[in-house]
Amino acid sequence: MVVKTFRRKRRMQYRNRSGVIYWHGAPGKNQIALTFDDGPGDPHTLKILDILNEHKVKATFFMVGRNVKNFPEIARRVAEEGHTIGNHTYNHRGQTLATPSMAIVEIKQTEDVIKEATSISPKFFRPPYGNANRWALRQAEKLGYIICLWSINAGDGLGGNWRRIEKKVLSESEDGVIILMHDKGRFSTQHSQKSTALALPRIISSLKESGYRLVTLTELLEL
Ligand SMILES: [Zn+2]
């Protein structure tokens, strides 16, 4: 089962045998959620936190357990500044071939390091690459998680041109969308999210000018 295909459906959530998967908030409130995956990392998570502070905006960070282990103080800062923290597995391995027990370990280990660093129990889960088999998703739900994907992929996962990122996000934005961005590169320490940090202030300003309020997933999904 490939979760990715669910996003094409123009619905806020998709119910299948594994339960409910959210990819969009309810329209009507002019709210949009910014989400940042794969961190925490230094320096880009810090840079993004500064930008969010400057614009008085709250967002959601889907953290990778091993990165929380390496940068617990950055995870703590994310929590202290009022952002929502989600679980994005420990090793960022694809979950399409994961056995139920592997899925549980990935989720639980991440939950434990997040709790240790921030005293927060994450309630949202996003599988790496937006893919997971139904057994893995069922384990996440059994552990009490709400599974959440995204409506717009900023396309910044591999860096890229910030103007292209800005254009893509703004042209696809509408009431209730969940935007996927990244606060840490996946593949090497050399790779940076510099483009994300360059595009972000412009994205926030434009969305605000269009009358949108930028909120956490907790607020957008009223969960
Ligand atoms: Zn990821």
Image (spheres, helix red, strand yellow):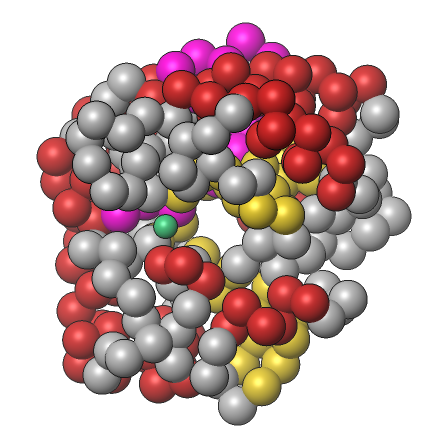
Who is closer to the viewer here, 164 or 201? 164
Furthest residue in direction top, as rendered: 54
Q: In the image, 187: left or right of 178?
A: left
Q: In the image, 204: left or right of 105?
A: right
Residue 58 vs 89, above or below: the answer is above
Chain part drawn in magenta: 47-64
| Residue 108 in view | no
Image position, residue 170 (x, y; %) = 73, 32
Image position, residue 219 (x, y; %) = 63, 44
Q: In the image, 183: left or right of 92?
A: right
Q: How many labels were placed on the picture? A: 0
Furthest residue in direction bottom, as rendered: 17
The part of the image, by quadrant, that contains residue 136 is bottom left
Name the residue: 35% across, 85% down.
135
Magenta stretch contains residue 88? no
Name the residue: 20% across, 55% down.
90
Who is closer to the viewer here, 19 or 201? 201
Name the residue: 60% across, 43% down.
179
Residue 66 vs 18, above or below: the answer is above
| Residue 105 in view | yes
Image position, residue 217 (x, y; %) = 57, 47
The part of the image, by quadrant, that contains residue 190 is top left
Image position, residue 119 (x, y; %) = 26, 41
The part of the image, by quadrant, that contains residue 145 is bottom left
Magenta stretch contains residue 50? yes
Q: In the picture, which quadrant includes the C terminus?
A: bottom right
Name the residue: 58% across, 54% down.
150
Q: In the image, 213: left or right of 34?
A: right
